[in-house]
Amino acid sequence: MRLAGPLPDATAARWQAITGMRLWTEPVPAGSAAETARRVRNREMRRPLHAGHSLRGVLVAGEGVADLIVVARRDVLDRDDLHRLVAAITTEGPSAPSWPDLSRCDSRPATHAFSAPSWGFGDPRRGRAYGEMVLDLDPQDIADEAAWSAALSAVLARYDSPPEDSGVVLVWTGAEYLPFQAPPAELTFLVGADDDGRCRLTVWHRLRSVSDLAAAQVSRHLIQARRSLSGDGRAPGDAEILDAPERQLILGLGRARRTAPVSSGLIGELFREQAAATPDAVALSDEHSRWTYSELERYANRIAHGLRQRGVADGERVGVCGERTGTLVAAALGVLKAGAVYVPLDPGAPAERLRWSVADAGLRLVVTAEQKPVGELGAELVPVSELDALGEGGEDKPPAAGVSPPDPAYVIYTSGSTGRPKGVLVAHDSVVALLDATREQYRLGPSDVWTFFHSLAFDFSVWEIWGCLLTGGHLVVVPYWVSRSPSDFRALLAEQQVTVVSQTPSAFAQLAEADRTHPTPLPLRLVVLGGETLHPRTVLPWLDRYPGSRCRLVNMFGITETTVHVTEQLVDRGIALEGSRSVGRPLPGWHVRIMDDRGRIAPPGVAGEIWVGGRGVALGYLHRPDLDAQRFVDDPAGDGRLYRSGDRGRLRPDGRLEHLGRIDNQIKLRGFRIELDEIRSVLTECPGVTAAAVTVRRLDPQDTATDRLDAYVVLDGTGTQQVRAHLARLLPEYMMPSAVVEVAALPLTRNGKVALDQLPRAEPTSGPAEPAFGASDGPLTVQLQEVWQQLFGFTVAAGDDFFELGGNSLLAVRMTALMRERGMPPLHPRTLYLNPTITRLADALRTP
């Protein structure tokens, strides 16, 4: 505070009377420049308090003026207290205000510990270091504290950060005021004017939580929001934090960094060209048969002519149903050559789902790849052998068809929120675009051997089949029983000298485990992962055995509605050790946007819904115009159509996309928002955990209070107790699984994803060894056991811990009510917390 006139002596006396401390005086030599006084003042404001001291006063005295500097611990004096103390010291006479009570150090609550903002991209290695920047403001930007508070609220809303736990604090003054010597929050703003009248925004940020780039971005958005809200009555939620140039920069951030050729064509015609180029090369093989490119071309042509003989018209949808065989691949190719659209049907799917899909697609014919019946589907079943015979004589060329590259090639049914599958129509050109984007980058060509591992009804098969056959590779069909056995699958890869394989992370974890101790490495040169979230640290053992120079490991994010793959991330040791959730940058021809729930572009680092645009966007849903209107939308930037994925993600400042799980995979448990993928990620980071899954289980279908989290782990060299200890170190109590269950392997669906409904019932193991009955034997022990079993729905032991079984405060209340109904002793919550096992609780209840 700037003092004028002959006040220092009086000020020092009042300081002594109020604080009982000495007021230090720091003289500034006569004639010294103003800059000297400024340096002394800044030094004293930033000099930390001595250990054990809570308050310091310094008078920087010059000619005719003096600066009073008061430094206090935040848990002793807040800003208002500090101003009251200064006013009491500098005001003479009976009108002097009362000063704050300086004896409240122990009564003040502890300073709130903020968590690192999710958008901060800080460096945990920076410890207590913090960055500082000062931005000049226009005088009209100053306004008042309420205006800046509204602007900050608008920014935090766009950053999806609850104000009470955002780690961001704004301090307002009209006078020089340093709110801390070390930042009290992860990001702190000070708005005000200095003693020369310059308007400034001073920014401090803890480097462990907020990078320089993120701090500069949020500061820019705060100023932009303040100007957006100025004078037009706009609500804070409507504030615009991005200006036009920055919006364009963000749009560019979501585009591919590399380029690729752009071509067009029909899948059947492109295969014909490949067959002409390499007629004698092996195209396809299964357990029983082997076809060269020329043989497969002639076989598919006969099937196509046979379909035309059965009346199939251009653009008609034709079902293809059967277990994985070479014949199934030939059938799909034949449908395309006939000018029709293939609709894959998985014979292992529930019969009702198959019948519904057949009816929804309006299928007249379903081509079956084997003689055995697949059940009544509501359409005529036509064996491939019959079509082959009907088309005899037409093997040299396919029938004439009036379809073009923008027309649909296939319809794949995906799960729907209504419980009914929905058909996705994908064009020939979208498949061609996928090959354009990957052919050169991954050196796909005739020397490659691929596996056809997944169901034809899973979109990974599109990448496996056409990625191989349209680049001249050899496609090896993996029988279903081999795909369920990691050791047999590994043997097949070795026997067939496979170079390119596609897997979901869950299936790949089992393959990697089967390969880990084998003396001879596999000949793989490219592994493509996708279909579900990859937790990178789980692939470290694989990278030890197969470094990037030997085998490229690529994690891809994709969606059926955007033609299999959208982004690519090379996974090396750096990415794996970082534990990054990055799925990389878009493929050439694709682009991504992160949008908030109002359809506005999210800033880099801020989570939102992933919208995908570009050459891979599907034609739409079959017979679902209402759903098309919701999910396939016109790009506000005028760049074609975008698909709203329903996936949550964020763009990193370097343009890489982080996939944060499904928006609908977020649950609410006892009032807390929980991402199941976050718990799974922590599980997979635990040493000795090779695979993990997390589910929510409701003990009482009618009561959400009985919801609990169950974890399943595949272990190598560790136990579930060590896993629980690892979780306890990293997760808050409300995110702790009630049970950690070891399984030999995670059950997989036919598409290679974790089959959550096939996991065993999770019943926590018993607690520390205590006699089931003994010293505590008696009616009360039996009654408690019955109450607990009624609460949890499974058998409990005398040593089980109530909270480790999944107990919580709501179940404790229910337990108290059940005990009261049975005439048992009253239960105080504290008693349960101190005695969480049946034996200990029974003893405590018996003790007066």
Image (cartoon, helix red, strand yellow):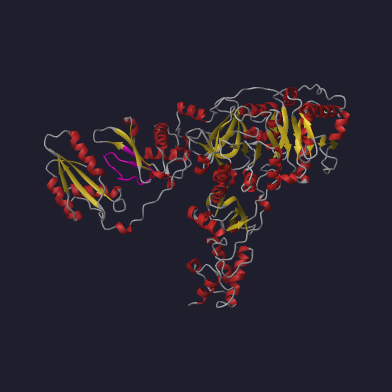
Identify the residue at horizontal 59%, vertical 44% (top origin).
664
Location of residue 825 (image quadrant) = bottom right
Residue 622 visible in the shown view: no
Residue 745 % position (x, y): 65, 52
Q: Nearer the viewer, residue 484 or 337?
A: 484
Which residues lie in the magenta part? 171-191
Position above or below: 845 against 662: below
Identify the residue at horizontal 36%, vertical 52% (top origin).
111
**Magenta-drawn stretch contains 4:** no
Location of residue 470 (image quadrant) = top right
Residue 687 % position (x, y): 53, 52
Asked whether, in this view, residue 501 is left or right of residue 12, the answer is right
Residue 35 % position (x, y): 20, 34
Identify the residue at horizontal 78%, vertical 28% (top origin).
340
Residue 831 visible in the shown view: yes
**Quarter of the image with the N terminus in it:** top left
**Magenta-drawn stretch contains 182:** yes
Q: Nearer the viewer, residue 269 or 190?
A: 269
Location of residue 449 (image quadrant) = top right
Question: In terms of secondary structure, what is the magenta stretch mainly?
Answer: loop
Asked whether, in this view, residue 519 is left or right of residue 482, the answer is left
Q: Nearer the viewer, residue 755 or 673?
A: 755
